[in-house]
Amino acid sequence: MKRAVVVVLGAFVAGIWLSTPVLAEIESSVVDGLAHSSFHKRKSTLEIANKAAAEKKATLESLGKACNLLPIRIGAILSGQAPLEKKTEDCLENQLGLKPGELAPLADPPVRWNAGAIYRLHEAVDVYAPAIQRWMNEHFGDAIMSAIDFTVKVQETKGSHGESRISITFEGKTLPYSNDEGWVPAK
């Protein structure tokens, strides 16, 4: 009898669990909710821009040169992590063959996950990592940067207005992922 009750109760709980929509993201703070909303407002425009870039085989380097910006800034814009300024909007729309104003939804500053909640270094990596990964793929193919064969250089520099700035250089060995040859069954 106990076993039958457990089986029926288990089936009931499983049925409820299976009929409940799965949440892809857990919003753990106000910032997470705002960031989620901000990203989803930009998502369709980001998809249009990145599809156009892929179709035109436009790289971060080529778009950066055309728009007179560093490639990582272009990558941050195209990953929804940096606001799109009007001059850059016009340039990207032209380079990607899009209609004027089509990228306008990317003009508002994004609400970023973990902003203010984690040290600024973590924020910088969170914000620019998708653009850096894209740049790495464009230059090295399917590869990552080693954090084992790795050095970090930190130094104080001066900005264009004489202000103190911090320069951090991560230098790691390029490690390619395995290709199909590594996945051939042993004979």
Image: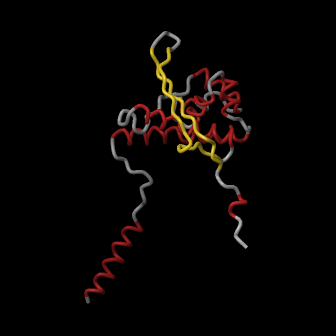
User: How did the renderer colour the structure?
Assistant: secondary structure
Which quarter shows the N terminus? Answer: bottom left
Task: Give whichever of 174, 83 is nearer the camera.
Answer: 174
Up-down: is 107 above or below 15?
A: above
Quarter location, residue 149:
top right
Name the residue at 33% across, 77% down.
Answer: 10
Q: Residue furthest top?
A: 161
Q: Give the left or right position of residue 38, taking residue 171 as reference.
A: left
Up-down: is 2 above or below 11?
A: below
Q: Which x, y percent locates residue 140?
A: 68, 41
Q: Give the left or right position of residue 124, taking residue 50 as reference.
A: left
Which quarter shows the C terminus? Answer: bottom right
Quarter location, residue 61:
top right
Q: Residue furthest bottom?
A: 1
Name the residue at 38% across, 72% down.
Answer: 15
Q: Give the left or right position of residue 57, taking residue 134 as reference.
A: right
Q: Give the left or right position of residue 14, taking residue 77 as reference.
A: left
Name the residue at 61% across, 24% down.
Answer: 88
Q: Residue furthest left?
A: 2
Q: Which x, y percent locates residue 130?
A: 55, 40
Quarter location, residue 30:
top left
Task: Give whichever of 63, 160 is nearer the camera.
Answer: 160
Q: Which x, y percent locates residue 28?
A: 34, 46
Task: Give whichever of 167, 22 is nearer the camera.
Answer: 167
Name the residue at 65% across, 21% down.
Answer: 68
Task: Give whichever of 105, 157 is nearer the camera.
Answer: 157
